[in-house]
Amino acid sequence: MKASGVFLTTNSADDLILEPQPRFVFDNPDLAHADRIACAVCEMEVTRAGMRIAIGGHHRHTFPTAKGVDQEFGCFSLAPGCRVIGHFKLDFTGEDDGLWQTAFCATCGAHLGWYYLSSRGLGFFGLIQDRLLALPEDMAGLPE
């Protein structure tokens, strides 16, 4: 894990102070070089390195959680080992009226991230990095 971030604090109701504070980020460096990426719960492959994409100029992004921990997610064009459920709108991008759906492991049902579909019909998976693991090259492939 690494720490980063800036928080607003107050000395009084009239003073706002901007000061750096540690904010923990889950970081999974093994995934940076992995060709095959799996669910950390059941170890079934969910996507591959060739499906990594950049959104907003970056493959990896962080977002805060209610517990003060930043979660890191990676963007993928496809995640054949995921299933998406439901539809809801979150203002992660603030750019259009797209929909976010929850993405689960197709094998064990673990929550792995989200699938975003823009109003223009373009989509991507945002998979939470600490819920994934790198597979050795000799393990079984994607679920059929």
Image (spheres, helix red, strand yellow):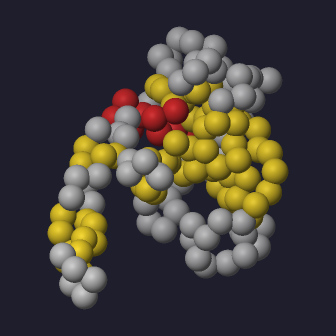
Residue 108 pos. (x, y %):
71, 22
Q: Which residue is found at the position 37% from the left and 30% from the top?
A: 30
**Relative horizontal placement of residue 132, taking residue 116 as reference (left or right):** left
Residue 122 pos. (x, y %):
72, 64
**Relative horizontal placement of residue 26, taking residue 55 as reference (left or right):** left
Q: Residue furthest front?
A: 12
Determine if residue 72 is in view. Answer: no
Query: Which quarter of the image is occupied by the N terminus?
Result: top left
**Relative horizontal placement of residue 69, taking residue 1 as reference (left or right):** right
Q: Which residue is found at the position 77% from the left and 44% from the top?
A: 84
Residue 80 pos. (x, y %):
72, 36
Count of numbered labels shown in the rendering: 0
Taking depth in this image into account, of 28 and 16 the one nearest to the observer is: 16
Q: Is residue 118 above or below residue 82?
A: below
Residue 76 pos. (x, y %):
58, 48
Taking depth in this image into account, of 18 and 85 the one nearest to the observer is: 18
In which quarter of the view is residue 119 placed?
bottom right
Q: Which residue is found at the position 58% from the left and 50% from the top?
A: 126
Determine if residue 101 is in view. Answer: yes
**Relative horizontal placement of residue 63, taking residue 144 as reference (left or right):** left
In which quarter of the view is residue 117 placed?
bottom right
Q: Residue furthest bottom?
A: 14
Q: Is residue 46 above or below residue 78?
A: above
Q: Is residue 53 above or below residue 43?
A: below
Q: Which residue is found at the position 80% from the left and 23% from the top?
A: 144
